[in-house]
Image: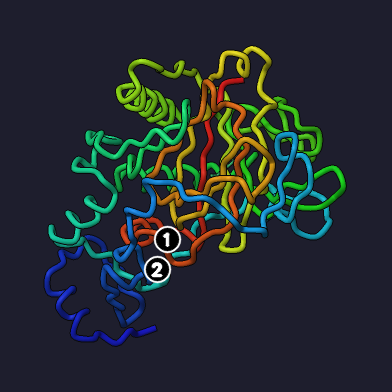
């Protein structure tokens, strides 16, 4: 489809270097940095909302007691688990539009996106430690920790693994009801029907893909940087052998639950869960009880890393809603990530 170039677009196109072009039959469609993909964007996001959790009074999240095993309204109608698309899994990215040309943003736009993501160096996960909040003992938020290029690589890797064997599928509970997200396990499989870890997925026998080595580095760097801000109460490091990757569409959610299917030793030692948020923002609840009314509410945005371990290891947590069109433009531009949110939680069994 030929897009009309408005005055802003002309300006944008004037300033951008063409990095990739596709000639489709006799016509080329040029789509500017702001417009290819989902549009909308996060430039207007109010970052200060996030630093301080506010008290929560939503009533539309029903808690779950044992790790993700009680049914809340984070579920869809009954049906067996299914990997979308035969042997392959659900594709978290949309097909590229024919003729859609990805343009390099000018320095001004790049710098603004880096500022929004709290990073000055897009080649590392973060060099900027100023956006660290201790939410409660053992629970640390690294705001905008993952640099844009890192977020992009994570999406690309998850997409690649997600469409293959052991990739994204829609999980369901024992009762046959489905969770309101797509899931892929790396390292070990977590089975929502039994709340247990195993080497293969019971419903199709697939082995979970390995955790990519670069993900391990990100996790240990995040823990190191988090501990630098809490030197008197450092969290133990982990050698993560499980990563649960969730993809929430814009109607996705996950009820309040505890992560307590890891080994007794891991739980006893308070080995932290390290969680990466990418794509659309989400409202995240956490608290001491499976009660949304007393839980604290936090906005998790693309690039945020949340860590909970030590005294916070058993915190109840969940996702009440996904904020539509809140993903950063750079990410949509470069990955064509579907509307929704990608979340990776790393744990050690
Ligand atoms: O999506 C999130 O931020 C939380 C995910 C989560 O709680 C889980 O996978 O156990």
Q: How many marks?
A: 2
Would residue 218 be seen by someone viewing this image from the given angle? Answer: yes
* Residue ID for mark 1: 336
* On-image quarter of the N terminus: bottom left
Q: Secondary structure at mark 1?
A: loop
Residue occupying the point 71% across, 35% down: 67
| Position of residue 347 measured from the top left corner of the image (x, y, whole percent) | 55, 26
Label 2 lies in ligand 1 vicinity (Cβ under 8 Å): no
Ligand 1 located in image quadrant:
top right
* Residue ID for mark 2: 37
248 or 138: nearer the viewer: 138
Taking 196 as reference, is 160 above or below it?
A: below
Q: Secondary structure at mark 2?
A: loop
Residue occupying the point 34% across, 85% down: 2
Would residue 88 be seen by someone viewing this image from the given angle? Answer: no
Residue 39 relative to residue 271: left or right: left
Residue 2 relative to residue 118: left or right: right
> Is label 2 in contact with label 1 (beta carbons under 8 Å)?
yes
| Position of residue 83 measured from the top left corner of the image (x, y, whole percent) | 70, 50
Residue occupying the point 75% across, 58% down: 76
* On-image quarter of the C terminus: top right
| Position of residue 178 measured from the top left corner of the image (x, y, whole percent) | 76, 52
Taking 3 as reference, is 165 above or below it?
A: above
Q: Tell which circle, 2 or 1, labels the residue nearer the N-terminal end.
A: 2
302 or 132: nearer the viewer: 132
> Quadrant location of residue 100?
bottom left
In this picture the colour scheme is rainbow
| Position of residue 173 measured from the top left corner of the image (x, y, whole percent) | 80, 45
Residue occupying the point 81% across, 52% down: 177
> Quadrant location of residue 348?
top right
């Amino acid at each position: 489809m030929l897009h009309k170039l408005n005055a802003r677009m002309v300006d944008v196109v004037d300033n951008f270097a063409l990095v990739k072009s596709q000639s489709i039959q006799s016509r080329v469609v040029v789509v500017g940095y702001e417009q290819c993909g989902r549009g909308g964007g996060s430039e207007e996001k109010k970052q200060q909302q996030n630093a301080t959790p506010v008290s929560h009074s939503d009533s539309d999240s029903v808690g779950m007691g044992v790790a993700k095993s009680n049914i809340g309204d984070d579920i869809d109608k009954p049906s067996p688990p299914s990997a979308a698309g035969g042997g392959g899994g659900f594709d978290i990215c949309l097909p590229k539009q024919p003729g859609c040309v990805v343009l390099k943003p000018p320095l001004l736009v790049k710098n603004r996106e880096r500022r929004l993501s709290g990073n000055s160096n897009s080649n590392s996960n973060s060099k900027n430690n100023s956006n660290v909040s201790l939410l409660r003992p053992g629970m640390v938020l690294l705001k905008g920790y993952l640099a844009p290029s890192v977020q992009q690589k994570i999406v690309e890797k998850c997409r690649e693994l997600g469409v293959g064997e052991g990739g994204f599928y829609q999980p369901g509970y024992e009762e046959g009801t489905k969770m309101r997200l797509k899931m892929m396990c790396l390292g070990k499989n977590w089975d929502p029907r039994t709340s247990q870890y195993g080497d293969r997925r019971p419903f199709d026998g697939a082995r979970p893909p390995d955790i990519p080595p670069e993900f391990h580095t990100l996790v240990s760097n995040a823990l190191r940087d988090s501990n630098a801000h809490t030197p008197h109460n450092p969290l133990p490091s982990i050698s993560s052998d499980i990563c649960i990757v969730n993809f929430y569409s814009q109607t996705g959610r996950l009820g309040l639950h505890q992560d307590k299917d890891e080994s007794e030793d891991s739980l006893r030692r308070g080995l932290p869960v390290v969680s990466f948020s990418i794509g659309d923002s989400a409202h995240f609840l956490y608290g001491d009880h499976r009660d949304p009314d007393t839980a604290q509410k936090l906005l998790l945005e693309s690039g945020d890393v949340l860590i909970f371990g030590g005294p916070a290891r058993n915190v109840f947590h969940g996702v009440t809603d996904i904020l539509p069109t809140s993903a950063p433009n750079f990410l949509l531009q470069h990955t064509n990530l579907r509307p929704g949110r990608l979340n990776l939680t790393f744990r050690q069994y």
